[in-house]
Amino acid sequence: MKIDIPTLKAVIAKKGYKWFDDQPNLIAIRTTLQIPDVFNDPLFIVYKKDGVEQLYSAMITTEPGTTYQKKLLNAKGVWVMMPAQMINAYKSGFHQSKPDHRCLQSLGKIYGLREDDKDGVLFNDKDAVPTWQEGSTIGANIHGAYHKDNIDETKVVGPWSAGCQVHARWSKKEEMMNIIDSYKAVNKGWITYTLLEEKDFV
């Protein structure tokens, strides 16, 4: 699946979503192939530098790892972000209040569901219905996984996501934050997150 700026713009338009010219367009795509604990969802940012559109890309997971699908941190179930455009959902901050872990904090409304069947398989809990929730009560940040010494890339999602959108590579997370932080003066720092599905590009 080759993704470029015109392709992203076309899909956003087809979905009836908003495209931003004055702030970053933060867009993730949930892949159709469901492989547990793998970072296989691409994340893109379309933004302008010196008036010219730029395309950033990274690999993340848009799904929680099996660790917290089976061992629930919340009795209502593990949080799973669902496809939607979440206007003004995020702001720059720190994951778990750690000053060395810049992230996008979920402070606006986000869209998702909770699965509580503990079977380690997503999207088969028939009682789980997507709803809009206050992101500040969910804590579904966009952050990095493991980072220590010279280790930049994490191979297995595992405990690194209990519903957060998590980068496989720490350096790409830092690059994302540098882009986002360069727009802090725009829209009071609020960032919109759009989660698409691979089938949207067919």
Image (tube, rainbow, N blue to C red):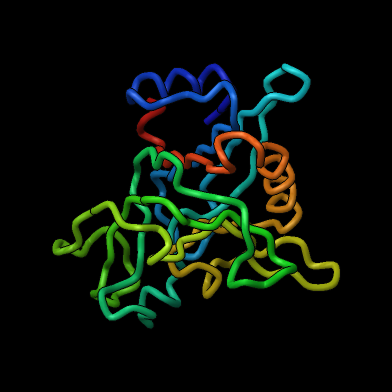
- Quarter of image, res 136: bottom left
Q: Residue at x 33, y 25 (%)?
A: 15
Image coordinates of residue 157 in percent, x first then y, are 54, 66
12 and 23: which is toward the camera: 23
Q: Residue at x 41, y 36 (%)?
A: 198
Image coordinates of residue 163 in percent, x first then y, are 43, 64
Q: Is residue 16 above or below residue 66?
A: above
Q: Residue at x 77, y 62 (%)?
A: 152
Q: Residue at x 73, y 52 (%)?
A: 174
Q: Is residue 96 left or right of residue 174?
A: left
- Quarter of image, res 195: top left
The image quadrant where one finds the C terminus is top left
Q: Is residue 111 left or right of residue 1?
A: left
Image coordinates of residue 189 in percent, x first then y, are 59, 43
Q: Is residue 190 above or below residue 64?
A: above
Q: Residue furthest left?
A: 127
> Count of labels shown?
0
Q: Is residue 148 left or right of residue 126?
A: right
Image coordinates of residue 62 in percent, x first then y, are 46, 53
